[in-house]
Image: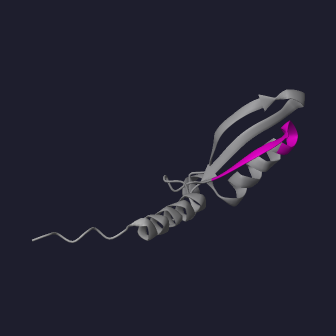
Amino acid sequence: MRTPPRPPLDGLKKRLDRHRTNDAARLPRDGFVRETYALPRTAARDKAREWFDRWPKQAYWTAIESWCERPEDVIEFTMRRLPTAD
């Protein structure tokens, strides 16, 4: 007796890839929401303060994840927080 051939999995693979891409675009794997800014020093300080006022560190684990100085006194930084507070 012969075993039947395997069905093609191309459609399933495409659907899985599309689903994974949509999930990855929505949230990173660790669940944090991140935004990157490149602003003059005073505006960067104000933006960070705005994040900490809007999403308190104790509830949302808000933090400046990384930062670096660019030419002409521009600060590039990434803010992160949890999407919701429990």
Left or right of 4: which side holds 62? right
Residue 33 lies in the magenta stretch = no
- The vertical placement of 73 against 55, above or below, is above
Instruction: For residue 85, say whether it is visible.
Output: no
Provide the major secondary structure of the magenta segment. Answer: strand
From the top left corner, tell me how far across and down residue 52 is, in percent.
Answer: 69, 52
Total numbered labels: 0
Quarter occupied by residue 8: bottom left
Quarter of the image that includes the N terminus: bottom left
- The vertical placement of 47 against 74, above or below, is below
Nearest the camera: 8 or 84? 8
Identify the residue at horizontal 51%, vertical 56% (top origin). Answer: 31
Identify the residue at horizontal 56%, vertical 51% (top origin). Answer: 61
Left or right of 2: which side holds 49? right
Colour mapping used in the image: one colour
Residue at the left extreme, as displayed:
1
Q: Where are the magenta residues, as a range? A: 34-43
Left or right of 6: which side holds 38? right
Instruction: For residue 82, say whether it is visible.
Output: yes
Identify the residue at horizontal 62%, vertical 50% (top origin). Answer: 80
Identify the residue at horizontal 49%, vertical 53% (top origin). Answer: 29
